[in-house]
Image (spheres, grey):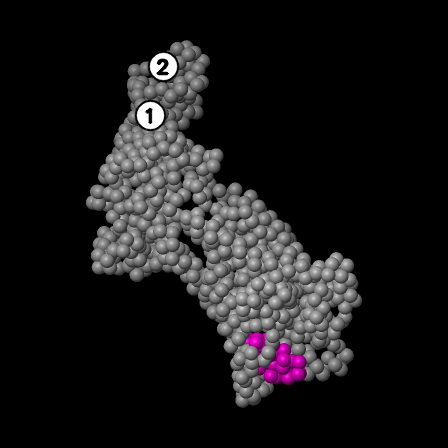
Amino acid sequence: MSIELRHVSKRFGSVSAVEDVSLTVADGELVALLGPSGGGKTTVLRMIAGLEVPTSGDLLVRGERVNDVPVQKRNIGFVFQSYALFKTMSVFDNVAFGLKIRNTPPAEMQARVDELLKLFGLDGLGRRLPHQLSGGQRQRVAIARALAPRPSVLLLDEPFGAVDAKIRQELREWLVRLHRELHVTTIFVTHDQEEAMEVSNRIVIFSRGRLEQIGSPRDVYEQPKNEFVARFIGVLNVLELTVRGGAARLNELSFPSHGVAEGETLRIGFRPYAVQISSNLQEHPHSAVIRHVYFLGVQLRLELETPSGLILRTRIVKDEFLRQGLEQGSSVSFQIREYRVLSTGANNLSPEVATVHSAANFAEGI
Amino acid sequence: MAHGIPKGPQVAMNSKSRRGIEEPEFIRKVLIGIAVGFVGVFLLLPLANVFAQAFAKGWSAYIQSLQQPDTRSAVLLTLLVSAICVPLNLVFGVIAAWAVAKFQFRGKALLITLIDLPFSVSPVVSGLIYVVMFGAQGYLGPWLDSKDIQIIFAVPGIVLATLFVTFPFVARELIPLMEAQGSDAEQAALTLGATGWQTFRYVTLPSVKWGLLYGVILCNARAMGEFGAVSVVSGHISGVTETLPLRIEKLHQEYQSVGAFSAASLLAILALITLGLKTWLERRQAAEQALGQYDSLSSHEH
Amino acid sequence: MGYSIVYLSLVVLIPLAGLLIRVTAMSWADFVRVAFSDRALAAYRLTFGASFLAATINAVLGTLLAWVLTRYRFPGRKILDALVDFPFALPTAVAGLTLANLFSQTGWLGQFLVPLGIHLAYTTGGIVLALTFVSLPFVVRTLQPVLEEFEVELEEAAATLGAGRWCTFRRVVFPALLPALMTGFALAFARAVGEYGSVLFISSNKPYVSEITPQVIMGWLDQFEYANAMAVAVVMLSASFAILITINLLERWASRFQR
């Protein structure tokens, strides 16, 4: 079921929560609405559900304007952050609620609920009350309840926020499997960019009520449209350079000036993998000391400190780290292989952030 | 049973932005109408009636009836009883709440049940208890008689009976408040070197001050207005053991309508002041709570 | 600690014990004769019946009031909220006096109602009226915190599942309110059962007809028949204890559903 927002805005009194958002969700997609707190993503989700009404703009489902259609008639499944299970009802009654409202015959209702309980690994728990369940179980009951009436779209508001980290991981994988099996258009809200990257087909990034970028996980990681997206997704090293003598410099590092005037500033960003290190101090033009090693399993995250005090983050596979005989406190040589320009000049004009520049052969200065 | 001062209503839902989860306008208006109508007829009208009847014969008749010597003594007696009972129950309430909230001891559940006792016992029974104990034919009757001490049918009896019916008020307000606080703040104070008394004065008391004031106000309102229990123990001796509520009864029995209503108007004014103070207290408490919340407030998404 | 025990003993326990001891001095046969005499039984019926009716009226209207006060915004809401506590603050004698006057033949409301055949002063109806008045705050104040803390998301969830407003109220909101409602009902009932002052003014106080239990006790006291008075009082006390225990159990049951 395709959903479309056209120039949708939402204001609460004098506060603008959502500004001029336009996006389309295709049938069967698994879309993440991502952004920091207060960014407007939950408001957009609630508008799609009908729990909030847009102040301006159009909300279309399958081409038809649904702004004025009440929640009850929209045939959507909504999973709340707090699960919102009916505390006085059993698991069975909770899941069956939507079916009961629609006057589903008891036999059919029983079959459907049993089917869902089995699918969600909840069979045998039908008679339990919400307060007798674990967090993960409550979560699944909430989703089962939303799916029981076979909605055309499933909406989830920060579904994995309230759960332990380990369970969160399992639930993420489970959601992906579920989506594959049921083919329901699914939209979920999260502030965790890793989650969005891992789970969704497409990510919609919000910041302060505005839409920053829409794209596949790979798109937004490799081709961020602006500085915000570049910094929000993944890890980014950011350097603020000043143009002196025709090159943009910061301490011992220098880069092309990209047309920025003398004395003006230039901000660049580069991913950890763009920083190459070697135990051979002659191999790369710059030197640094490994200030800290973060052990993440197969990969290690390193913090490098240059003689002038700059901190850079990079990653290296454990085997490679050991092979080079490195350890915390080792001296290494490094180079920055590629970078993006985040902003130029005092006006902070956002240039082509998506473009990656190779710095491999630029060694002017020092 | 009490939950401290009842909280003010939540922020009402903005009806313009939500649909499907609010009652239709019409239903809302009807419900509000019924509520207002009910309260208006049932609560406001009787209140207004008190003053209407008190002033039925004019302002001077009103003043005159208030200046009747027996009525004056009734007012004074009521004030005296209140002046004794409220402070005593205040101290008891604080100590009892402190004990219940901060310590574990045997018989704690019993103490809590006992504190709630006067609330569920009929006032007449409350008074009866004291008559049985201290009355002429009661347990201690002969003994008191021999010492020439009169409790029943005298002021001391009235004080005792009033003490009984009003002692839960402060304690009941404070217990849930103190329990909800937990003892973290006090333990912190102790680690910083404060003595028990200092902790109590500087940490515990300020945090329950609104509940305390609220309990005091209620305690006072009940102390001044108590009828049943006092009626049993007082003997209804005009000018001596008649509190204001009993005076109203006497005047009513003597068909002195204006007199009765005039005396009643005094108590009605007291009730209004009590209500006003309570509302003011709630607002102060809410304001303080709102300030405190800013510490732990994370940015909210709409 | 010690102070509170001493205080409690003096003020509560010893007189209470005295009461109970005195009663046991009575023979069982005498006790039954007095406590369950026709006059007493008539009084119990009236007391508990009228209290039950009053508590029920308050349960219904109290729920409505609590809903209106927590969910709606309208001019005068704060005043309405404050007024709910009025029966708490007003002495019972004043309440009885003014209610009796209001509904009497010459009263503001009585002048319209009496010609219609609605006699609320000096009748059983008046007793119910007075009891409803004094116990009104209990249901409202017990429900308000529960309503205020009620997760709106539960109602939203019901809406997303297709439930209309009334359906949501019936299936989702009301069951969650029920424990608090029952507690409020029990509190209102307990209050009404013990009420004396206001009823004295509004009832015609005729034995066997319109006499409530406290008045029976008073009657015995006036004749210095302490033992008889206490016999009836013990019945009342037992009822009070039973209600108190019920309330405690209800509150415990209500908290069962929280996490």
Q: Residue at coordinates 60% horizontally, 83% vertically from top-left?
A: C228
Is there one chain holding both mark 2 and mark 1? yes
Viewer-side residue, B153 vs C250 = B153
Viewer-side residue, A205 vs B53 = B53
- Secondary element at image label 2: loop
Viewer-side residue, B91 vs B54 = B54
- Secondary element at image label 1: loop
What amino acid is found at the position of numbered circle 2 in the picture?
His
Residue ID for mark 2: A258
Disc number for residue B296:
none
Mark sitting earlier along the chain (2/1): 1
In the displayed structure, would residue A101 be above or below residue C242? above
- Name the chief secondary structure element in magenta: helix
Q: Quadrant of the C terminus of chain B?
A: top left
The local crowd at label 2, few if under 14, some if 14 to 19, many if 20 or more residues have their Cα within 10 Å, is few
First to last magenta residue range: C210-237
Residue B132, picture quadrant: bottom right
